[in-house]
Image: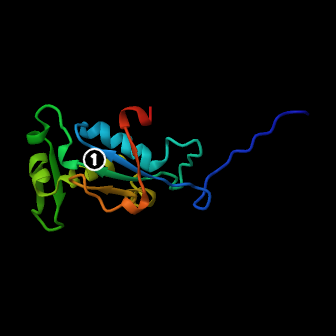
Amino acid sequence: MDTLSYKTVSANKATVTKEWLLVDADGHSLGRLASEVAKLLRGKHKPSFTPHVDCGDNVIIINAANVQLTGNKWEDKTYIRHTGYPGGQRSLTATELKGKNPARVIEKAVKGMLPKNKLGAELFRNLKVYADANHGQEAQKPKSINLNTATK
């Protein structure tokens, strides 16, 4: 039978091309920013996306202190953790967490949108978040992207 045959190409660690992307969080809404960054980290914007491989890009987020939350989320949103001891549940509001470390707000939002397995932990290592415009990855020559137009 004369038919076309197409091979499904599956990416692996050797064939993946990774870039460094620079995202400015200034004025962006936290959840919308985090979902777009999670797509970039996962590699879903690439035609060679393979679900079980780290085929995403390295992402640098600057100006994390200027991220926005809508409504009363600065006071109402709580981040809960447990120390591991009886009665050891601790919580922080978004304002308190931003006061301690503004980068952690974005890190927690993005981490929650990645897979909950070894691949997700590996993808999270490709994210660098900085509270201001200074970052230490100038040597990688990151490509600045606008999230409003980049991954649509």
**Visual colour scheme:** rainbow
Front residue of 14 and 135: 135
Amino acid type, label 1: Ala
- For the N terminus, which image quadrant? top right
- Name the spot of residue 78 as percent of width and height, x first: 14, 46
Quadrant of the frame with the C terminus? top left
User: Is residue 77 placed above or below 89 in the rendered structure?
Assistant: above
**Residue at the (36%, 59%) spot, across then down:** 138
Residue 123: x %, y % from top left = 42, 56
Q: Residue at x 32, y 48 (%)?
A: 110
Q: Nearer the viewer, residue 28 or 107?
A: 28
The answer to whether any part of residue 125 appears in the image is: no
Vertical arrangement, residue 126 with respect to residue 151, above or below = below
Percent of width and height locating residue 135: 29, 58
Q: Which residue position is annotated with label 1? A: 109
Q: Residue at x 40, y 58 (%)?
A: 126
Q: Secondary structure beneath disc 1?
A: helix
Quadrant of residue 14 in the image?
Answer: bottom right
